[in-house]
Structures are given as C-alpha cells and as structure tokens.
Amino acid sequence: MSIEFKSLCKSFDGSRVLEDVSLAVEPGEVLFVIGTSGTGKSVLMRHVIGLHRPDSGEVWVHGQRVDLLSERELFEIRKRCGFVFQHPALLDFLSLEENVAMPLRRRFGLGRKDATERAVSWLSQVGITKDARSLPSEVGPGIRKRASIARVVALGPEYIVYDEPTTGLDLVNARRIDNLIRRLATETKVTTVVVSHDLRSIFGIADRVAFLYLGRLHALGSPEELRESNDPILSQFLRGRAEGPMVL
Amino acid sequence: MNPKQEQLGPNHRFLAAVGASTMAPFWVAGAIVLLLPRALVGLKERGWPAREVLRQAYSAGNRSVLLVAVTLASVGMILVYHGGLQAQRVLGDMSPVGPAFIQILLREFGPTIVGLMVAARVGGGIAAEIGSMVVTEQIDALRMNAADPIRFLVTPRLIAVFLTTMALTVFGCAVAVASGAVTANVLFGVPHQSFLNLSMTEPGDLITGLIKAAAYGVYVPLAASWAGLSAGIGSEGVGRATTSGVVVGSLGIIVLSSVIGAVTFAFGL
Amino acid sequence: MTCPPDDAGTKGGLGDALGQDLDASRRGAASYQGSSSYEDGVGASDNLFRRTGRVCIEVLSELGAMAYLAGRSIAALFPPRVEWQGLIISMHRFGVQSMPLVIATAFLTGVVVLLLAAVYVRAYGATQLVGWAAGYATFRELGPVLIALMFSGRVGSKNTAELAAMKLTEQIDALRALAIDPYAYLVIPRLVAMALVLFALTLMGNLFAIVGAATTGELLLDVSYHTFWNSFAENVRLADLLHGLFKAVVFGIAIGIVSCRCGLSARGGATGVGRAVNRSVVSSALAIFVLDYLITYLLP
Ligand SMILES: Nc1ncnc2c1ncn2[C@@H]1O[C@H](COP(=O)(O)OP(=O)(O)OP(=O)(O)O)[C@@H](O)[C@H]1O
Ligand SMILES: [Mg+2]
C-alpha cells in the first residue's frame, strides 16, 4: 500500500507535460523527485491527491485508484495523504496559528484550546515562535513556507508529498526541515515524496531519487547510484553545469 | 493610517479616524476631478487619438448594450406596472400612465440607470484593466518611455465612454418606452397611441436628462481610471481596484443625480 | 469537442468540483480562441447566428455551473455543521461594508418613488395616494431591487475579488488538499450571510425610503407628514413588506451564488481577478432583474 504512478501522461492545452511516467514509492521510504524547472514535477505530485487527473495512465494511493475517484471520495485519500504546496497557500485571513489549528479543529473536532496548543507546538518544531499570531501577509516567504509545512504535518498523515520544502529557506532552517522530514519517515513510517532542487537535502535524507527530464522518468536509484552514474545528462544536472547535452 | 495618529491618545485617535473617513470621499472626489484637466490637456497636445477612441468605444458599447437593454426593459416594466396600479386605484383613468412614465424616464430614470450600468460594466472593466497594468508595472514602463500614462490611457477612455454613455442613454430610453408600452397594453389595456404621448414632457425634462447623461459620461471613466491607477499590489490589488471602481462610480452617480436634480429644479427647468 | 479525462473519467459523474470548473472555463476560452481564428480565415462567415449560438451556449453553461455550485453547497450542508465564526465574521463585514451605500440608495429610492407619484398628485390633487404609492412600490419592488443592486456592487464584487485571489494563489486547492470542502468552509457561510444581511438591510432600507418619501412629499408637494402617514398606514399591508423581504432573501442567495461562482472560476493572474469581479457585478444585476420579474409574476 503506497503511492504508485502507472504510465501516466498529462498535457495542458495540447502541450505534453508528462509522458509515460511509471514510478512506485516504497512504504516508509523518502523518495526525492528532481528535475529542471518546468519539467512537470509539481504537476506529477498534484495527481497524487486528485488535483489533476491524468490523460491516460493510473495513479494508485493506499490501494485505491485515485484518478477515478469523485471529489467526495478523494477527501478520504486526502485525509491520509498530506500535501505541502510549492507556494505556501496559507489562508490569508487567518493567522499562522489559526492556519494550523483550523484543520485540526475541523478534521478531528478538537476544541479551540487544544487545537491552538497543538498548533503552537508544531509551529515551534518548524522554528516559528514569535510570529505565530501574525497574518501570512505580515511575515516573509520563508516563515510562510514553514508554517505551511506545520499545517500538514500537524494532521499526522500516513503519506506526505512536499513540493520544494526547503526552497527559499536559510541553511539552518532548511536542515531543520530535513530532519523533521526524516524523523517523521523513520519514526512514524510516513511514506514521503519530496520535490527538491536542494542537493544537500537529497544527499542528506533521500532513500531513493527519481530524475525527471523532459516529462519522462530518466533515472531512478539511491543517491549514491545516481552520483556514480555516468549518464551525461544526469551528471550535468547533478553537477549544475551550464554546458552539456541537456536541452531545455 | 497616518503615522501621526499613533502619537495621539485613544480619544483623539478615534476623532482622527472619524475625521479621516469623513474627509475620504472629498479627497477621492478631488482626485477624480483633477484627472479631468490632465486628460484634456493630453487632447490639446496630441490631437484626437481617434483609433484608440474608436476601439474603446466599440468595446464599451459592445460590452454593455445587452445589459442596458435588459435592465431598462425591466425598469420600464416595473415602473409602468406600479404607475398603472396607482392610476387604476386612484384615478380610474389610465391615460396619464404613459405620458407620466415617459416624463420621469427621460428626466430621472433613463440616464441614471444607464449610468449605473455603465459604471458597473464599463467602469469596472476600465478599473480592472488599468489596475492590472499598474500591478504588472506596465504603467511604470510607460513612464520610463516618457509617455504620460494619463494621456495614453485616460484620455481615449474618457472620450469613448462619454460618447458611448450618450448613445446608450438614448438607446436605453427607447427600450424602456417600448417595454413600458407593451406592459401597459398587456396588463392594463392601454392603447399604444395614448401611451406614446409627450404631453407631460417639457424641454426642461429633456435638458435635465441630457445634462445627467453627459455628467455620468465624464464622471464614470474618470472615477474608474482613478480607481485603476491607485491599485495596490498583487491580485488582491486588482480586485480592490475593480470593486472601488464600481462602488465609487455608482455612489458618484447617485450624488450627481441628486445634485443635478436640485440645480435644474432651482433653475426651474 | 472532446472532454479531457480531467472531468470525464470520474466514477461519480459529477466530477471533480473545482478542477471541473477550471477545465470548463479553460475549454471555453480555448474554443473561443479557436473559433475566432477560424473566422479570421473564413472572413465573412461570422454571422449573427453563430454569435447568438455562442452566447447562448456560454449563458447556458454558466447557468449550469451556478446550479452545480448551489447543489454542491447544499450537499456540503450534510452533515450539518455551522461555521459560526465564518458566518458571523462574514455578516459583520458585509453589513458594515454596505451600510452607507444602502442608506443613501434607500433614501433616494423614497425620493424617486414620490416623484413617480408626484405627477398624479400635481395634476389631480390625489394627496391620499402618496403614502400608499410610496409604501407599496418601495416595499414590494424598488426597495429590494435597488438595495440588492447596490449590495451586489459593494459586497458581491468584494466577495468575488477575495475568492478569485484565493483561487489564484492556490488557497482553494490547499483547502481541498487538507480534505476541507471549500464549499462547506467558504461558500456556505457567505451564501447564508448574504441572505441574512440583505434581509436586514432591506428591512432597514425600507424605513429610510419611507422617511425619504415623506420628506420629499412635505418639501416638494406640500403633502403633510400626517396625510402621508394616514395614507401609508391605511393602505400598505404587511403582505407587501413580506413580499419584498422574501425577494431580498432570494436576491441575497443569488448574489452569493453568482459572486462565489465568478470568484472560484477566476483564472489568469492579476487580470483574471479584475475580469471575474466585472463579470460578477454584471451577472448579479441580470440575476436580480430576472428573479424580480419571476417572483412578482408568480407570487401574489
Ligand atoms: N494548470 C495548468 N495549466 C496549464 N499549464 C500548466 C498548468 N500547470 C502546469 N502547467 C505547465 O506544466 C509545466 C510543468 O509545470 P510544473 O509546475 O510541474 O513544473 P515544475 O517541474 O514543478 O517546475 P519548478 O521546479 O519550477 O517548480 C509548465 O510548463 C507549466 O506551464
Ligand atoms: Mg514546481
């Protein structure tokens, strides 16, 4: 029971974004998805909780085929599977604290006091203490991002998809988020997919790495395997060189 | 909020807030009025931007003609229905229904309702358009090229909306009279000849109506442009600009309608 | 036109709520562009029929989308769970936002209604008509309609702007991802709040309209307050007031549905918000007139 894509294709207005992507996430592992900007990583992830539906192919989560579920049935999947958006997408009329507490109250019927307590403790785990009462518009993007991570992990999902959780964070906070992701995966067996451009996270906490290139799955393996690989495109990407065989 | 207000005590702060919100409409009105000479100066310097005016007039007319038709037809129906009920109940004579309706339509309702619709449709559109130019920094780009945004954006819209409003007012009144005539005929059996009768309409009514239409035609594009030009940041900024274009436009029309009504009344028109 | 599986391939048939909204509007835009470029090539064949047909299809699909939104909102009411906080905040905001505009409009309505009757009063000396004329027309028709128009301009457009901004910054998708139904959390409190607030505003506005009418009568037509009141009290029935208040509730729900729909279907960045707001104001006005006609026609 995990997350699996089976020969998934997706295009927008006639332009192909994803082509025949097949990828299975092992239970309890941390799988990183990497690739150049615009290659369709976020689009692929949005399929997991039914925010996009594939043109062809299948998406399986927790033993169910999500691309066939109705919006109502998807809510059951979304309760199991958390999703951290690339852009924080916090509700702009609630404070950070309320942003974390509101789903707790609605989903678990917690009282206001309990929910706020839990929200505060999760916010402090991502390094937010004094800004907890501010509105999202009053804090910087890095804090918003971390609050949006807290909002998802506070709900204790069995699967979590993080879309670029450390992009735009300072190095210290980025490592703290890495540790949090790793800890949740190891201690509570959360099956985790992380989209990232952050090489330090990749080589720090990934179990396996999938490399998307031009909408296709180009390479898949442990970080060491990928590093040692002599595929010219992959090694150009991992070393971040401007010159090479990659087309954009 | 004014930073100075933070130095005041709570009572004074309250007074300052009351004062600020009382003065706000006047500041806005002033800013809108000040746009007029700036837009007209552009006209004198560069001549008629004929092509842009035509384009804007076409889009303004095209956007609002259906709305004006539906609205004025409904208003004609509602007014004739109530006027007819009153006449039936009190006079038992249906002959004044048509003339009375036409008189008040030309003087009050026609121009004002058309103006309100133009403010919602065209004014909102202008505010959204200019607002998103501000948000995406296109206005600053214009400035960088030493082009005056007011002359470039406001002047053609002013002329175009003025012409469109006048035309739509005539059109809307015609629609309302037609729908009123049909209503009176169907509901109260009033023949068309006795409905379409100008015996109660005087030149003063027509002049008042035309003055109103002209005033709205000038006011709406200026108010909308002002709202667009003062847009804040982000997509909320555009939303707020559009809302305030519609709101300032329709509030201003209500005020103008009362003021012009009072002035023409005082002059015995 | 082929349906992409984004909405066609779902088991429930109703499909993916917001995703479907999005795709429907995207498809609309694409087909529009397609047909216009096609016409460029063909030249003269952009005839009236084709344009009319296109408008009809757009109007129908828009109506369908609104019915869908209403249905989804009703479905989200089960199990019943009132978002008290959201409801009260919305009501407060809507009320405060629109109060001054509504008072001004209502007062003006009273003045205008009296001017409508003035012709008969002047020509035939029918002063006993004045209070009834003002009360009847205001309560049943002009009060609810004009106040609702102003309300949609102020509150409906603001609501659309907010929801559109939320849609474009992925806040709506974030709610869905948190397994919170945006219809239950965002739409229902707004619909209910708009209906309640417009009801209250119309009730209050009626009062101001009558005051405006009575004052105009006194100043312009030399009809004393006393005569006005007698005519009003004798002839205007509670049913007239209730008729208008019923309309106000219906208008409130309609403005809510239209403004939420326009906001939630916004697309295309900052420009998209402006376009959504504009569309919302216009559609609300049309909805108000059509519903007013229907209710007046169908109800005693
Ligand atoms: N809703 C949409 N409608 C149309 N096109 C879309 C949509 N969402 C994404 N795309 C297109 O799909 C492509 C892939 O986008 P995506 O956001 O998945 O890239 P990404 O790999 O996440 O890039 P980044 O690293 O910059 O986040 C882009 O070209 C984008 O324009
Ligand atoms: Mg992305």
Image (tube, coloured by chain):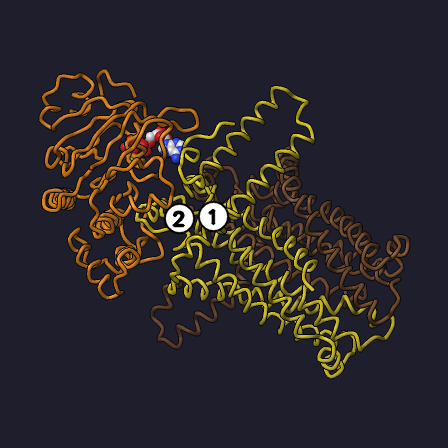
User: Which disc number belongs to residue C166?
Assistant: 2
The quadrant where residue A166 appears: top left
Q: Give me the chain letter of mark 2.
A: C
Q: Residue at x 67, y 62 (%)?
A: C299
Of residues A25 and B97, which is closer to you in this image? A25
The quadrant where residue A104 appears: bottom left
| Residue occupying the far bottom of the picture | C226
Q: Please say if C237 is above or below C288.
A: below
Residue placed under numbered mark 1 in the picture: C263
> Rounded to the nearest whole Å, what is the CA distance between mark 1 and mark 2?
9 Å
Quick check: can you spot residue B35? no
| Residue type of the residue flagged with mark 2 | Met
Mark 1 / mark 2, whichever is N-terminal: 2
Residue B132 left/right relative to B48? left
Q: Colour of chain B?
A: brown
Marks 1 & 2 on one chain: yes
Position of the N terminus of chain A by quadrant:
top left
Q: Colour of chain C?
A: yellow
Position of the C terminus of chain A by quadrant:
top left
| Residue type of the residue flagged with mark 1 | Gly
